[in-house]
Amino acid sequence: MRYAQKLICLLLLVLSASFGVGGCYLLYSDFGVQLDRINAANAAAHAQVCTLLQTEILDLQRRGVDTGDDTVAALLQNQGSAAALWRGENLLCDTLEVPCDAPLANGTMCTVRSGDKVAALYGSDLQGNLHLVSSFDLTGLYRDRDASLRRFLGLEAVVLAAGAAVMALLARQVTRPLRVLTATSAQIAGGDYARRTALHTGDEIEQVSRSFDKMADAVQEKIADLEADVQKREDFMGAFTHELKTPMTSIIGYADVLRSLQTDPDEQREAAAAIYHEGRRLESLSQKLLALLALGGEELELTDLDLASLWQPLRAACPGAAVETPAGHWVVRGDADLLLDLLCNLVQNAAKASDPAAPIQVRCREAETTVTLEVADRGCGIPRAEIDRVTEPFYMVDKSRARKQGGSGLGLALCKRIAAAHGSDLVIESTPGQGTTVRVTLQKGGSV
């Protein structure tokens, strides 16, 4: 089915639905108003019949006249109304136009259909265990409603036929610029990436044209971004190779010395210590790299977590750092292991940038729906130009100092991935010579 045909069908569907629903709503709302008015009048007439019958029965009783079943039935028949009368379960009189097998509950009303007849039945209880049901004809009202509905459906058919003809002309005019879009897209697919549509129709087609042209521009930008990503991957592999080469060179060199030369015990201990140190560096590098890659997988399942439960394992994991933790409890949505890993990396980075025994503060700032976790130090700080790059894998501001302290350049990159897994970002504020503050904002949890 062509686009113009789909457009016509869709517009006809909308027109018929809106016209039909609106017309039926008006018809049935008007019918409902008339029905309510007639029901109110019928209820009043039923009440009048009940009052009159009850009055006549009481008058006969005052005069000492027998008010047996036949007498009461005769009184109802003399009124000439369509009604039925029961005494208990016994039917005394029935002049209803529609069947009613049993008396209705007191004060109730129902609508009954019987063939072409429609009637409203009203039930009331009278003294002497009498039950009266009155009938009022609604056939004419329902017949008028059905006639109005048929006239409306005929009018709707005429309107839809005229609308279809008008919409066919409009659809042909509207879809004409699409041929230009089709031809242009074919040329771009053929390699003419500089081709643009540049339609000026003054309507939504012009917006589509602009979007199409922006898409072509975005494709060129995406190609540039892909090239940049390729370059970043090459830089990553180069840095990774370099990070592996440095400790491996030391390990191989010292191992060769132990294997091929006769050395004294001090030299042996020095070589073994160097091999152990570089091996631990490789182990730390591989663990962080695996954690960094793992965080790029499935979405985490976050649970309610009290941040205060992380302070003790944080001190145990960073025995050489003077960590100051806050008093209090803050329940957040998070993963305990990952948040502990984030804090450990931030505290270890802060310890490397600070003087020995310098305090490293862990702070929590509570807002309405969030808790901001901060790690602050008074260390050497980070130059402003370097802040945007310190979260890149293997990037180190001072490479010689970082390697000397056992750093790999993966800590902040891992922290950034952990923050992203918690729906947040790693915010770094730093002033050279004054210190650094790193923040991550977490969503509040319930209670634990």
Image: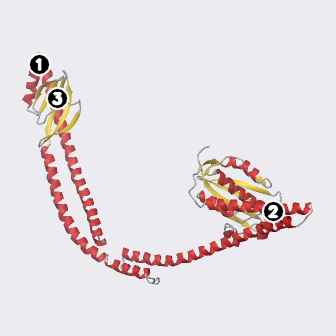
* Numbered mark located on residue 252 in the image: none
Identify the image quadrant of residue 155: bottom left
Tell me the CA gap for discs 1 and 3.
16 Å
- Say if mark 1 contacts mark 2, CB within 8 Å: no
Tell me the CA gap for discs 2 and 3.
108 Å
Q: Which residue is mark 3?
A: 132
Question: Disc 3 residue type?
Answer: Leu
Tell me the CA gap for discs 1 and 2.
121 Å
* Numbered mark located on residue 68 in the image: 1
Disc with the residue nearer the chain's start (1 vs 2): 1
**Viewer-side residue, 78 vs 422:** 422
- Say if mark 1 contacts mark 3, CB within 8 Å: no
Q: Which residue is mark 2?
A: 275
Q: Position of residue 172 (x, y in %)?
A: 27, 76
Circle 1 packing at 10 Å, graded few (<14), some (14-19), many (20+), is: few
Circle 2 packing at 10 Å, graded few (<14), some (14-19), many (20+), is: many
Helix, strand or loop at mark 3: strand
| Residue at 19%, 36% in the rendered image | 43
Q: Position of residue 1 (x, y in %)?
A: 29, 69
Residue 383 visible: no
Classify residue 227 as left or right of residue 405.
Answer: left
Question: Disc 2 residue type?
Answer: Ile
**Viewer-side residue, 411 vs 177:** 411
Disc with the residue nearer the chain's start (2 vs 3): 3
Of labels 2 and 3, the one closer to you: 2
Up/down of 23 relative to 83, above or below = below
| Residue at 38%, 79% in the rendered image | 181
Identify the image quadrant of residue 11: bottom left
Q: Position of residue 61 (x, y in %)?
A: 13, 18
| Residue at 9%, 32% in the rendered image | 95
